[in-house]
Image (tube, helix red, strand yellow):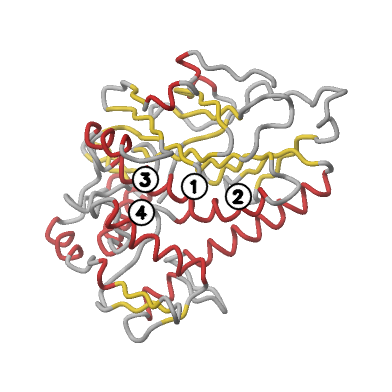
């Protein structure tokens, strides 16, 4: 996927006050070249921050290569390898990829089939249509429903055969195509975050293409990070506070949004985005966006897709039955709803971010 247009706003970030126990820690920022990924955190020195973020960048790059369905990389059995070779014979893959595929299969059942990593053949048809529309809007078209239905016949999650002992992957259907866009970015972000929590930079926020993962509280006296939720009708700009629909004050958690306002094309005045329902084979239109807040970024990433594909009432009941998960919905009429547990963290409902 994705996507995601959550972006992080640091509110009133001030240098550490003199005399505080954490006064030796300073705030640093690192943006990955050529991407929208950013890490900001507090470290005892610039050198230690650079060491931690350099390792994080290496990890992100390695996971990107493993989970990439569009490119091959020398010496890496990745998702591209599987989609081109796993129907011929079982393919052994790195542990992070194998674990992610296992998680995807498990969550297919948990979400009642709404998030199906085996839907790649259907998503490919929509991807091709979006590429054409991006290149020349006058040539925009919708994939033919007959082709979509035909592709959906090759989206049986049972055809993704995983051998836990050998750590191999086999496609029982030669036409199976796996797509990890609904979870890969969040899953990778969580793996990186877990390493950072063990480092000298455990007070951090990661903004990985819109997937936000924050660590311990900021070491400038505040109790939480201020995380801005984008207005679906706004523009993604780092200094455009008018585009922030809500601000949440949180730490040690993940915040991921799925919405209709990124990776879309227009045809006859209607928006066709990238979040496709396995039930209708069309982009879902239940809402403008949904944001999931839970500790694990991979879980937040996948659940945000699942909730976006559910009507609000169904999604609200689903979240209310989960432990440690909160959510915020922006419906088509622009009304905002949030779970009760999240309300105490929302600026619009009176939450603030005082110093300790």
Q: Earlier in the sequence, mark 2 or mark 3?
A: 2
Quadrant in which the C terminus appears: top right
Q: Which mark is residue 324?
A: none
Q: Earlier in the sequence, mark 2 or mark 4?
A: 4
**Between 102 and 53, which is closer to the camera in this rendering?**
102
- Mark 1 neighbour density, 10 Å: few (under 14) some (14–19) many (20 or more): many
Q: Which residue is mark 2?
A: 193
Q: CA distance from mark 2 to mark 3?
A: 19 Å
Q: CA distance from mark 1 to mark 4?
A: 28 Å
Q: Are marks 1 and 2 in contact (CB under 8 Å)?
A: yes
Q: Residue 81, percent across and down? A: 43, 76
Q: Residue 57, percent across and down? A: 65, 56
Extreme-right residue of the structure = 19
Q: Are marks 4 and 3 in contact (CB under 8 Å)?
A: no
Residue at the location (22% across, 53% down)?
278
Q: Quadrant of residue 84?
A: bottom left
């Amino acid at each position: 996927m994705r996507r995601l247009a959550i972006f992080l706003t640091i509110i009133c970030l001030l240098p550490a006050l003199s005399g505080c126990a954490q006064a030796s820690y300073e705030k640093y920022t690192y943006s990955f070249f050529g991407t929208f990924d950013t890490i900001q955190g507090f470290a005892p020195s610039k050198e230690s921050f650079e060491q931690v973020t350099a390792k994080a960048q290496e990890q992100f790059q390695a996971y990107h290569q493993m989970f990439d369905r569009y490119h091959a990389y020398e010496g890496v059995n990745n998702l591209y390898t599987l989609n081109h070779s796993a129907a011929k014979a079982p393919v052994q893959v790195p542990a992070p990829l194998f674990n992610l595929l296992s998680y995807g299969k498990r969550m297919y059942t948990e979400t009642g089939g709404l998030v199906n990593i085996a839907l790649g053949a259907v998503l490919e048809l929509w991807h091709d249509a979006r590429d054409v529309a991006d290149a020349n809007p006058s040539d925009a078209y919708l994939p033919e429903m007959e082709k979509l239905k035909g592709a959906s016949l090759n989206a049986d999650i049972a055809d993704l055969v995983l051998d836990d002992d050998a750590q191999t992957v086999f496609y029982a259907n030669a036409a199976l195509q796996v797509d990890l866009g609904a979870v890969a970015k969040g899953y990778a972000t969580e793996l990186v975050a877990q390493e950072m929590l063990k480092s000298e930079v455990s007070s951090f926020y990661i903004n990985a293409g819109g997937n936000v993962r924050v660590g311990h509280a900021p070491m400038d006296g505040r109790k939480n990070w201020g995380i801005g939720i984008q207005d679906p009708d706004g523009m993604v700009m780092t200094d455009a506070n008018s585009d922030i629909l809500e601000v949440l004050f949180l730490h040690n958690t993940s915040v991921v949004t799925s919405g209709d306002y990124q990776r879309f094309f227009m045809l006859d005045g209607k928006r066709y985005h990238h979040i496709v329902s396995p039930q209708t084979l069309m982009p879902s239109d239940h809402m403008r966006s949904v944001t999931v807040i839970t500790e694990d970024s991979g879980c937040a990433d996948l659940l945000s897709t699942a909730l976006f594909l559910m009507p609000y009432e169904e999604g609200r009941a689903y979240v209310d039955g989960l432990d440690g998960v909160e959510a915020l919905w922006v419906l088509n009429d622009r009304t905002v709803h949030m779970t009760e547990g999240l309300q105490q963290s929302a600026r619009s409902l009176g939450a603030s971010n005082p110093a300790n």
